[in-house]
Every structure is written in structure tokens, then in C-alpha cells.
Amino acid sequence: MNQLAVTEADLHAYVDGVLSEARSAEVAAYLAARPEELARMQVYREQNAALRELFNPVLDEPVPSRLSAGLIDRSGQFARYAAGLLIAIVSGAGGWMLHGATQADMLAGSSVKNTKLMLAGFARQAVIAHGVYTPDVRRPVEIGADQEDQLVTWLSKRTGADMHPPKLGKLGYELVGGRLLPGESGSPVAQFMYQEAGGQRLTLYVSTDQAQNRDTGFRFAQQGAVNVFYWIDGKFGYALSGGINKGELARIAHVVYEQLDGKPQ
């Protein structure tokens, strides 16, 4: 009997752990022969884990009485069902409709605000974009660093702002290149990617539609395995994301900030 072709639905079901044991083994073999697809599925798996981290706390919260009357028993199964359904809906969209946020960790350094506010919308999108593009081996960026002038001209024109990437070579990170992404309101944003000798990658996400955002502090948050420092400067929103420890990322974030002519509040 010929093995059934592996579809996109199979891949997502594999990530969600709902395939039969036999079919799961077939999909695993399919992915083992396709490193790029395997990396893409790992991104989805990490996004699912992040979503569960965000929404699991509501599983044991009591359902408001106005909603629970006649719908649930004492075990609170409706709350668990609703939260589980929300996770399934959001993760099924590949993480792009993420509308929750992790709480910020206790932050080190007097220049970094210690906060438990929700992760800012643009920073949340920056973390998701980091997870989507950094695993890509063949095409992590749209325009490479070997065409930096073209990259700067293109991103500056599309965003309507000066988009020169900071220089991080002295910190061991060289520019890989960049790409254009859609922002919260649909306006274009820039993503610059950096890589060090060991293969570790960082991304700097630059939004230009933050003029109404009054939360201008220099902040840290963690979502899954990704750490992010983010801040607002006028209409600009900056988010530096990476899988490195908070202290190292903070050091790099301050250098980025200094090159962008500002001081963290």
C-alpha cells in the first residue's frame, strides 16, 4: 500500500499531537528528510507552548456567574473547555492572532522598569516574527547585508522613516539583512536580523506607528524561549528579541538604544 501524501493539515495535527501513532511516525519520517519543514513545525510547536503559557492561568479561574448559570457544573468544565477552545483557535492560526501576553519578569538595572504590564502589541508581534524567521536556513531575510544600501533605501521608502540598522559587530553580531513586515495597523514595519559566529540570531523590530503609545519605558519581557527588550521613542517602537540570557540581551539593547540617539527612561 502506498503511503498517503503528507498534507499541511497533517503537519499541524502532528504539532498538536492528535495524529494516530502510525500516522505520526510517517509524518516524523517525512520531516526528518526535510530540515526546513522540520524547523517550521518547531516554530509552530513553540508558538503553541507560548499560547498555553499565556492562557493556562485562566483554566482554574471561576466563570463569572452571569455566564455560568445553567452552563456549567461545580467542576468548572465550561471554563476549561472555553480556555482550551481559545488556545486551539489561536494556535490554529499559526500564532498570528495572538491577543494575550506574558507578564514581565523581575527586571534588573535601574534603567529598566520593573513591570507586570501586558506585553505591548508591537513587541508581541516582534517576538512572533522572531520565532517565524530566525529558524529559516535558506531565506531568513528578504535583502541580505551584502546589499545593505539597497535594504536601507527600500525599508526607508516603504516605512517613511530613516531605517539604518545599528552596528553590532563589536558585540559579536553581524547584520544578516532585513525584511518588511505588516504592523499592528497594517502599516509597514522593518525587521533587521543579526547573527554571531555560533549561529545565535537576534532581531530588531522597528515600528513607526507608536505616536499614541504613552508607555515609553525601557521594558523586558519573556515569551516562551524568547527574551525581548522594547521601548518607545516618539512615533517609533523598537523591540530587540533573542534566545540569549536577559543580561546579555540588555547589554546589546542599550547599545542599540544609544546608536538610535536616546536614553532609556
Image (cartoon, rainbow, N blue to C red):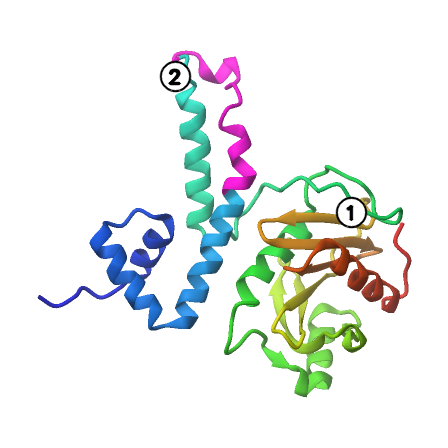
Q: Residue 187's quadrant in the figure?
A: bottom right
Res. 94 in view: no
The residue at the far bottom in this view is 146
> In this image, 39 relative to 106: left or right?
left
- Residue 173 locus on image (x, y percent): 72, 74
Specify the label residue 12 is tagged with: none
Q: Verify CB contact (< 8 Å) between mark 1 and mark 2.
A: no
Name the element at disc 1: loop
Of 45 and 97, the residue lying toward us: 45
Regarding mark 2 in the picture, which secondary structure is present there? loop
- Name the residue beneath numbered marker 1: 213
Q: Amino acid at mark 2?
A: Leu
Residue 80: image location, x then y, percent: 43, 27
Q: Nearest the camera: 105 or 212?
A: 105
Of the 4 image quadrants, the one containing the N terminus is bottom left
Residue 57 locus on image (x, y percent)? 55, 31
Query: Does residue 40 sit above or below 125 in this rendering?
Result: below
Above or below for 225 versus 136 = above
Residue at 42 percent across and 60 percent down: it is 41
Specify the quadrant of the image occupied by residue 258: bottom right
Q: Residue 74 in the image: x percent, y percent?
A: 41, 12
Q: Magenta residues, as a range?
A: 52-73
Residues at marks 1 and 2, CA–CA distance in whole angstroms:
39 Å
Residue 7 among magenta residues = no
Q: Is residue 224 visible?
A: yes
For label 2, the residue is: 71
Q: Nearer the viewer, residue 150 or 31?
A: 31
65 left or right of 14 in image: right
Q: Name the residue located 81 percent from the left edge and 66 percent from the top edge.
A: 256
